[in-house]
Amino acid sequence: MDKNILPIKKAVLIFFVFACGYFISALLRAITATLSPLLTLEFNLSAGDLGLLAGGYFLGFASMQIPLGYLLDRHGPKKVVSSFLLIAIIGTVAFALAQSFSGLLISRILIGVGVSACLMGPLTGYRIWFADEYQQRANAWMLMVLSMGFVFSTLPVQLLLPVIGWRWIFGFIAILVFFVIILTLFFIPSWKTEVNNNYENNTGSLSDVWKNKFFRSTIPLGLFNYGGMVAIQTLWAGPWMIRVADYAPIKSATGLFWINTTMLVAFFIFGYILPKITKLGFDTMRIIKFGLPISYLSLLAIIILGENAGAIHFTIYLLTSIVLTLTQPAVALSFPTNLAGKSLTSFNLLIFVGTFIMQWGIGLIIDLSQFFGKGEIQSFQISFFVYLIICIFSYLYFLLNNRNE
């Protein structure tokens, strides 16, 4: 597929529309961290139940990634994103009306399915419409939008809860999704008219992606490191602050607010300086190799500090993990444009399957540790330590497979 670089004004408009959809996707992803005390009380949820509920979003999201790759390469972001967002409206309304844990879980899965194209659709379009040197920046600034969604899922949601309740919050989100569909249909270019997309001549296959040496080296990083980082940011940082550091719910929400506000600024700066850093010879591989060990030390500090680890420590951990976000555009750039959708959604599948595994898994290990007589603080520490060990092995696998890069 040929690239079709768009003029700056049109590119900015497209970015804005896609950013609106991804903002809502992020808001829906992270809102369970803020709502966790309320949902736990109202539906009598265990740590495993809470992890499964939050992970249901990622289960639905991940289930769509492979078919999404084919759909995006064939039909383009405009049709795919707008169609999937209709499912998001159904899931959001169903969540607002749910009366049981099973109802919440099914609705959460539907939401995950519905917003599953909100990042992959834009990144597929950017691969065709934006120059190669701006791919890392576009990715970083989409993640800035992600952090903006996370920010609004914290303190603003906490402040709205006593005013309108969590059910009406989800009703309002459903209305916002509808408006994003309208914007997408009006302003996103048609794939057939803007891109020379002859699908019959597009011979790239999914096996080309999964057989690629570099892609395979990133599989554990995507599953466990990246997935676990998202699991902590969107769920387990909140319960840690409440149940380990003894934060009140409003203090936890405030902590999450500042964590995500910091990440928002960090992604903006990171996206701005990336092209400049690359020109100085600090390529993606070098940044990942030397940056990731710092994040492991940050996570180890949280584990050791236990009840003394709070919002500032999670902020440092997430800031030092920011280098993980380079893996997704690096994967996309390692393939030709005719495999843009398939390569991006394949890696996204790893991230979201991993997030589901880690969100649920961390909760299960906490429950299991308490079953064997460990205290709540120690159970959280054990669970996070298991995650750290898995991350280190994933990193070593990546190094061994890219030692000549």
Image (spheres, rainbow, N blue to C red):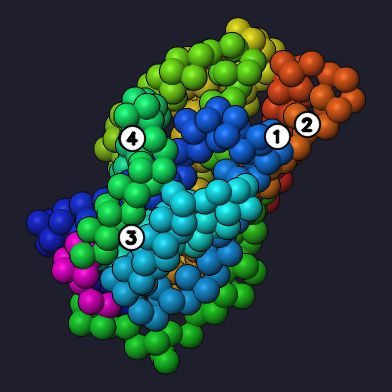
Whether label 1 touches label 2, CB < 8 Å: yes
Q: Identify the residue at horizontal 43%, vertical 85% (top origin).
A: 202
Q: Nearer the viewer, residue 105 or 344?
A: 105
Up-down relation of residue 307 to residue 73 (above or below): above
Instruction: Give the structural element (helix, strand or loop) at label 4.
Output: helix
Q: Which residue is mark 3?
A: 122
* Between marks 4 and 1 in the image, the one whose residue lies nearer the viewer: 4
- Residue 167, image x, y percentages: 41, 43
**Where are the magenta residues, as a range?**
183-191
Tell me, yes or no, whether the highlighted magenta stretch contains residue 187: yes
Q: Earlier in the sequence, mark 1 or mark 2?
A: 1
Answer with left or right where residue 249 lies relative to residue 263. Answer: right
What is the distance, in whole Å, between disc 3 and disc 1 at their CAs? 37 Å
- Residue 175, image x, y percentages: 28, 54
Q: Which residue is mark 4?
A: 164
What is the distance, in whole Å, between disc 1 and disc 2 at their CAs? 8 Å
Whether residue 219 is visible to the viewer of this picture, yes or no, is yes
What is the distance, in whole Å, between disc 4 and disc 3 at their CAs? 33 Å
The label number, if any, that marks residue 367 in the structure image? 2
What is the distance, in whole Å, between disc 2 and disc 3 at their CAs? 39 Å
Q: Nearer the viewer, residue 203 or 112?
A: 112
Dot 2 amino acid type: Asp
Instruction: Give the structural element (helix, strand or loop) at label 1.
Output: loop
Q: Earlier in the sequence, mark 4 or mark 2?
A: 4
Q: Identify the residue at horizontal 20%, vertical 52% (top origin).
A: 16
Dot 1 amino acid type: Ser
